């Protein structure tokens, strides 16, 4: 269940706002993440409808922001009711990745 109807984050000096409808519209413009050809620098995914999308790509498409931080993106998407997931193994499960958790 969504905990909010609109969420905001700051990237650089600009504050970006988005709603669940803007996220869905952005997803419609993007190709879903492809498990047969995964992006080497994208390990966080978000479920929109019945497809998975790369978290950062989706937020950048929904807002026009650049250099969005993964942690910020996934937390704001979760607030809007979009569940996220990641691929992890070995020490990533035990310790996390500082670029994604810090």
Image: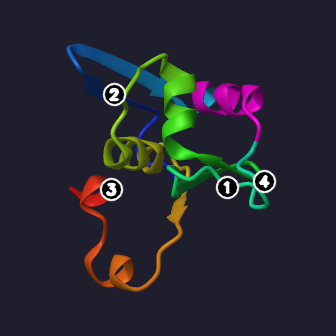
Nearer the camera: disc 1 or disc 2:
1
The residue where tag 1 is placed is 38
Up the image or down, 25 lies above or below 94; here it is above
The residue where tag 2 is placed is 8
Nearer the camera: disc 2 or disc 3:
3
Q: Position of residue 84 (x, y in %)?
A: 52, 58
Mark toward the start of the polypeptide (4 vs 3): 4
Q: How many marks?
A: 4
Tag 2 near tag 3, CB within 8 Å: no
Q: Position of residue 94 (x, y in %)?
A: 30, 84
Up the image or down, 43 lies above or below 91; here it is above
Q: Can residue 23 be found in the magenta stretch? A: yes
Q: How far apart are labels 2 and 3 at the CA level? A: 19 Å
Q: Give the magenta part as a residue range.
A: 22-31
The residue where tag 4 is placed is 50
Q: Residue at x 47, y 44 (%)?
A: 77
Q: How far apart are labels 1 and 2 at the CA level? A: 28 Å
Q: How is the image coloured?
A: rainbow
Q: Residue at x 77, y 37 (%)?
A: 31
The residue where tag 3 is placed is 100
Tag 2 near tag 4, CB within 8 Å: no
């Amino acid at each position: 269940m969504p905990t909010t109807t609109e969420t905001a984050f700051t990237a650089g000096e600009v504050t970006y706002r988005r709603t669940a409808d803007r996220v869905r519209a952005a997803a419609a413009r993007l190709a879903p993440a492809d498990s047969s050809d995964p992006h080497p620098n994208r390990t966080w995914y978000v479920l929109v409808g019945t497809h998975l999308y790369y978290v950062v790509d989706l937020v950048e498409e929904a807002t026009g922001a650049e250099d969005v931080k993964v942690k910020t993106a996934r937390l704001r998407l979760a607030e809007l009711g979009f569940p996220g997931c990641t691929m992890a193994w070995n020490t990533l499960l035990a310790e996390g990745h500082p670029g994604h958790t810090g």
